[in-house]
Image (cartoon, rainbow, N blue to C red):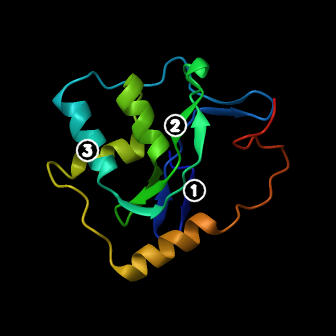
């Protein structure tokens, strides 16, 4: 399920849980994609998405915390979905599948790589990413927050 749907975009969730005290994580039963051509095809599609917002900041690896800050956090799009390079990192490193909707979308493209969206679409994607989410009642963990 997409974390956010707005303005024609779906924002892919990365993590299964986000605890306000311990931070994000994956459910033990998170689907995986075995190494091989199928996994590489999905990863290639995700890597080839058009950069919408890039940052040099890195977050800690939540699967192997001893790795420290190695996880990229840039945003990419194909004009329909928006995902972070974090999704691609966890797929590449651990075989952790993207959320089901994004994975189905990528697989439906076959061997086609994402086309570069029109400038107006990219402008809307940037606005989508930079628009603050609706206020929530519960506290939310953020990157860099001390635990």
Residue found at x 84% / y 44%: 138
Judged from the image, the secondary structure of the residue bearing numbered disc 3 is helix
Left or right: 133 in relation to 105: right
Asked if marks 3 and 2 touch (Cβ < 8 Å), the reply is no
Disc 3 to disc 2, C-alpha distance: 17 Å
Who is closer to the viewer here, 38 or 48? Answer: 48
Q: Please name which of the two marks, 3 or 2, marks the residue nearer to the observer.
A: 2
Q: Residue at x 56, y 26 (%)?
A: 26
Instruction: Check residue 71 in the rendering and tell me which mark sits there, or answer none.
Output: 2
Query: Could you tell which of marks 1 and 3 lies nearer the N-terminus?
Result: 1
Secondary structure at badge 2 equals strand
How many other residues sit within 10 Å of disc 2, few (<14), some (14-19) or many (≥20)? some
The reply, left or right, for residue 116 in relation to residue 145 is left
- Determine whether, in the image, residue 91 is placed left or right of residue 30: left
Location of mark 1 (residue): 4
Identified at 62% across, 67% down, the residue is 130
**Where is residue 20 shown, x and y percent of the image?**
79, 35
Against 4, residue 88 (above or below) is above
Q: Could you say where residue 107 lies in the image, as x and y percent from the top left?
A: 24, 44
Determine the residue located farthest toward the left in the rendered image.
111
Q: Residue furthest bottom?
A: 120
Give the number of the mark in front: 2 or 1: 2
């Amino acid at each position: 399920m997409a974390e956010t749907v707005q303005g024609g975009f779906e924002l892919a969730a990365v993590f299964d849980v986000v605890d306000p005290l311990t931070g994000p994580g994956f459910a033990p039963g998170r689907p995986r994609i075995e190494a091989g051509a199928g996994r590489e095809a999905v990863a290639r599609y995700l890597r080839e998405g058009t950069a919408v917002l890039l940052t040099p900041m890195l977050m800690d690896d939540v699967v192997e915390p001893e790795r420290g800050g190695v996880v990229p956090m840039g945003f990419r799009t194909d004009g329909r979905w928006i995902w972070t390079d974090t999704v691609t990192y966890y797929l590449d490193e651990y075989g952790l599948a993207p959320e089901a909707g994004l994975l189905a979308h990528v697989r439906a493209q076959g061997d086609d790589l994402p086309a570069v969206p029109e400038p107006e679409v990219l402008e809307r994607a940037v606005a989508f990413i930079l628009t603050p989410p609706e206020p929530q009642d519960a506290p939310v963990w953020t990157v860099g927050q001390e635990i």
